[in-house]
Amino acid sequence: MTTPISNKEEQILVSITGQDRPGLTASVMGILARYEAQILDIGQADIHSTLSLGILIRIDEMHSGQVMKELLFKATELGVNIGFSPISDDEYEAWVGRQGKNRYILTLIGRTLSAAQIEAATKVIANQGVNIDSILRLTGRRSIRQPQQNSRACIQFSLRGSIDRREMQEQLMRLSSDMDVDFSLQRDDMYRRMRRLICFDMDSTLIQTECIDELAMRAGVGDQVKAITESAMRGEIDFKESFTKRVALLKGLDVSVMRDIAENLPITEGVDRLMAVLKRCGYKIAILSGGFTYFGEYLQRRYGIDYMYANELEVDDDGKLTGRYLGEVVDGHRKAELLKLIAQVEKVNLAQTIAVGDGANDLPMISQAGLGIAFHAKPRVVANARQSINTIGIDGVLYFLGFKDSYLGEDGN
């Protein structure tokens, strides 16, 4: 009696670890190809030239033993370790059913990242009962012999599973405050990968000062204006009311001082790098500022910014400030309106927008944008924002967008 030929197939997870070398993957695939194995999944990581390669194959049971035998010989020849794990049909189908659902990206940023900081973050992940699919370093390799000024470190976790986003967000923000590390938790969808419009506050965001305070110092009313500014940024008084009071105190100041202030603006760490990358990658960029048009236009020219909205100071015939302003005040409500308006003009889905700011008057646009980021912000703003950057420069925004230093030609990752 002739024994029937079995056409039953099985899944095998092939795991390879060891010293990486050119041609290793090609050698393994050559063996699998001879036996017409299907590749159901493949993933590889290389850390300090140490390889970790996983290949999930589906193959006829008649050939699986011979394939594993040949792979073992090849692994010995190449000096790597190899292991095999059977995956049942039920296990495979359950895995397939989870794909593409409830995926998140958690980004960690700091000047450096310690084991303690990563432990704290991964405990939050574990408490949510979600899997870490991959861990990716976004920043370049740093020298231990030549420490870098304004160093930065960033890693990105790819997560899969159902989470209580509000609870997880609250836990991460507490860690951010306690452990000097920044977090961004984003749903991993097409919008995260296709951001197109980014709107910035100006004062204390793109520049490390409040222009109205600079003008006030020249007018001799610095302390008075600064006190009102701080109260407004904390959200203690209405922005429009505070703005009107502060502008009134500038009456009589000669406009010539504005040029000197503009030419000596303290640019925030990372602005040059951030703007260069955003322009190179085709982002539309806007300044939405409660400050003044003179300084906004200066930055617009310097960085080739596409849109700029701010407040215009009234000047009399003698070139003196009148203590009044022209047009509608760009307050928090107006910033949110402008964000939506520019998105409509550029035909950009609101989910593809980014807003970055530090003050209470930035909260409406930060809340409205697809990705809202509090940058070195006041406590109230940090408490109400989903993402914040407090540890490094404003170019940290690039890591929340998924950029790697190697993409920018800054590291041979």
Image (tube, rainbow, N blue to C red):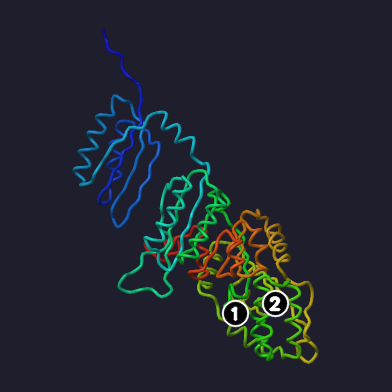
Quarter holding the C terminus is bottom left
236 and 264: which one is in front? 236
368 in relation to 247, above or below = above
118 in relation to 255, above or below = above
Question: Residue 53: which disc?
Answer: none
Q: Is residue 33 left or right of residue 405?
A: left
371 in relation to 18, above or below = below
Image quarter for residue 370? bottom right
Farthest-out residue, top: 1
Image quarter for residue 253? bottom right
For label 1, the residue is 209
Image quarter for residue 140? bottom left
Point out the frontmost of discs 2 and 1: 1
Q: Amino acid at mark 2?
A: Thr
From the top left corner, tell me how far across and down residue 194 is, in percent: 57, 54
Q: Is residue 79 left or right of residue 344?
A: left
From the top left corner, tell me how far across and down residue 257 is, in percent: 66, 89
From the top left corner, tell me how far across and down residue 266 is, in percent: 56, 81
Residue visible at 40% across and 36% down in the picture: 40
For label 2, count other residues whose C-alpha is less than 10 Å away and answer few (under 14), some (14-19) or many (20+). some
For label 2, the residue is 293
Quarter holding the N terminus is top left
Question: Which secondary structure, mark 1?
Answer: loop
- State the CA–CA distance, disc 2 to disc 1: 15 Å
Q: Amino acid at mark 1?
A: Thr
Question: Which secondary structure, mark 2?
Answer: helix
332 and 277: which one is in front? 332
Residue visible at 48% across and 54% down in the picture: 106
261 and 130: which one is in front? 130
Residue visible at 42% across and 33% down in the picture: 92
From the top left corner, tell me how far across and down residue 260 is, in percent: 62, 88
